[in-house]
Amino acid sequence: MQKYQIIFHIDLNAFFASCEIALNPSLLHEPIGIGGASGRGVLTTANYEARKYGVTSAMSVGEARRLCPNLKLLPVNFPLYEEKSDQFFEYLRQYTDVIEPASIDEGYIDMTHYCEGKDAVAVALRMQEELNTQFKLPCSIGIAPNMFLAKMASDMKKPLGITVLRKRDVPKVLWPLPIESMHGIGKKTVPNLKLLGIHTIGDLAHYPDQHKLSKFLGNSTVSFVAKAHGHDDRVIDPTRQEKHQSIGNSKTYDGYLHEYTECLEALEQLTERVVRRLMDADVKTKTITVQVRDYEFNTRSKAFSFPYHTQDFDAIMLEVERLFDALYEEQTVHLLGVSASHLEKTERLFKQLDIFKEKLPVQKDDAVSEILNQINKHYPKKMLKKGIK
């Protein structure tokens, strides 16, 4: 008998603004707009304090300031957002590796196995509280038997909402919602659907002429109608949305790291996690970046690019140590991060080698590295390393 799926969709609330507040808690009760700090352009996002005044994302700065004269404008800080996003997804991996990122601030997570014999709502509440207390990342969580319903559920209560949406709830809860609230229906499609008399999700579920619908929904017509009935047979795929741009891990040390050796031990642990994730995703990296933040919150980073792609721990750790040496100034360390970018699927690399008749520069050691990596995967701490030449 097939086990009933329990899917969580976790959506970080006003993510960019939440990141800024995590960095500077004095902003907690201030209306914040992200983007357009020069006073021009449009806002990327606004926190909920600003939204009370009617300020929204994609609104011009001029209009936002008219609605909220006390609006505090902040520039976009992508390194900060990437760091907090890494913390978010690394936290989720405490529960399962079956995670599908939907964007930098939201993801689907299969909690079927973890929640067996547990109260799913209680688990979600604990996750919500821990994300908020540990990382200052408020979130909303949708709980459902499939990905579509989980996404719809997480949108129903913001901020800090937890919503359960079952298939039997669809007629009462989902069908009365306006068609523009249906996930996947674009703004340009809404007016056309309304011309057909489709104003709610229920109208779409019961529309009698799929041929007419297909003129506006195309090849996705059958899928959208099925979702309107609460059906979605997609399985969470950790690689579906992930384009393998980067894999990283960072950690904030509340007690700070004072000694060089402490930092190296911490970097080794972070690098082990990154390499394990590279192996799990079956990708290899060409560029390694190390990030250091000191007690005064000054953040610096350095990167190194290999002449080839690799997932060998020893080669990567050697460069991580070199990068850290270039950054370290005997300061107290608050945060360390290691990330791997310019990634490529292992299978694709072998195909490229076959096409161009090339050899990897480290091909000689690949068999040994692969054996060591496979053994180390089964232990929480790295057990085996290469000998020194």
Image: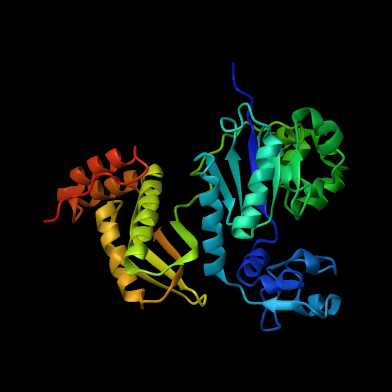
Give the residue drawn at x 56%, y 54%.
88
Q: Quadrant of residue 339?
A: bottom left
**Quarter of the picture holding the C terminus:** bottom left
* x and y percentages locating residue 204 in the rendered image: 81, 38
Q: Quadrant of residue 267?
A: bottom left
* x and y percentages locating residue 303 in the rendered image: 36, 69
Q: Quadrant of residue 337?
A: bottom left
Which residue is the extreme one toward the top? Answer: 1
Front-most of 86 and 358?
Answer: 86
Front-most of 171 and 295?
Answer: 295
Give the residue drawn at x 35%, y 51%.
272
* x and y percentages locating residue 32 in the rendered image: 73, 72
Which residue is the extreme one toward the bottom? Answer: 38
Front-most of 10 and 24?
Answer: 24
* x and y percentages locating residue 276 in the rendered image: 37, 46
Left or right, 224 with reference to 257: right
Which residue is the extreme one toward the left? Answer: 389
Image colouring: rainbow
Left or right, 164 with reference to 281: right
Q: Is residue 42 visible?
A: yes
**Quarter of the picture holding the N terminus:** top right
Give the residue drawn at x 53%, y 48%.
241
Q: Is residue 308 visible?
A: no
Q: Give the total of numbered labels.
A: 0
Left or right, 375 with reference to 76: left
